[in-house]
Amino acid sequence: MYAVIDTGGKQLTVREGDVVKLEKLDGAPGDVVMLDRVLLVGNGAPKVGAPTVDGASVQARVVRQGRGRKIIVMKFRAKAHSRRKTGHRQAFTEVRIERILG
């Protein structure tokens, strides 16, 4: 069984037992989170939502909270002696998909 979920402005295809990185969610490691925005549930003949599948949800357990690799952002204006260098690390939540209810 698989599902397509929408979280953090991104769509992911998940199966039971998968470990995926999502945009930051509230919860400590070991907590259970329910992902309600399920766009499609498939097991043989898929059920497609409009826009979401009624009564479907995905149960996931938080594995860890973290931050991604640093991305360097450089802004440069020619002939103006202007340089700006900053970095960014995106926060994420790693979850293990436990059950797909639907």
Image (tube, grey):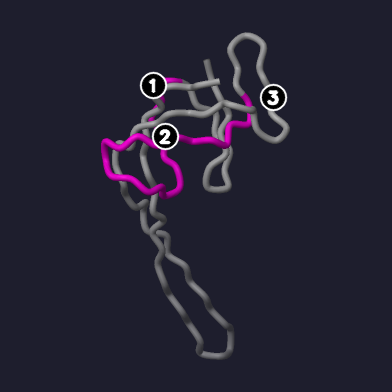
Amino acid marked by disc 1: Gly
Q: Which residue is mark 2?
A: 20
User: Front-most of 49 and 22?
Assistant: 49
> Amino acid type of disc 2?
Val
Task: Please name whichever residue, 70 or 99, is drawn nearer the observer in this view of the structure.
Answer: 99
- Dot 3 falls on a residue whose secondary structure is strand
Q: Image point 44% across, 35% down: which residue? A: 34
Which residue, as the protein is rendered here, is positioned at the far bottom? 80
**What's under tag 3, amino acid-wise?**
Val
Depth order, front residue of 89/32: 32
Say whether disc 3 or disc 1 marks the residue closer to the N-terminus: 1
Quarter the C terminus occupies: top right
Q: How far across and down, in percent of the image, does residue 72 sit? A: 42, 64
Q: Residues within 10 Å of mark 3 (few under 14, many from 20)?
A: some
Q: Is residue 52 above or below residue 48?
A: below
The residue that disc 3 covers is 48
Badge 2 vs badge 1, beta-carbon distance below 8 Å: no
Left or right placement of residue 31 versus residue 102 in this view: left
Rendered view: 96 above or below 89? above
Magenta residues span: 16-40
Q: Quadrant of residue 28?
A: top left
**Marks 3 and 1, how far apart in space?**
22 Å
The residue where tag 1 is placed is: 17
Q: Which numbered marker is on residue 74?
A: none
Mark 2–mark 1 distance (CA, rounded to whole Å): 10 Å
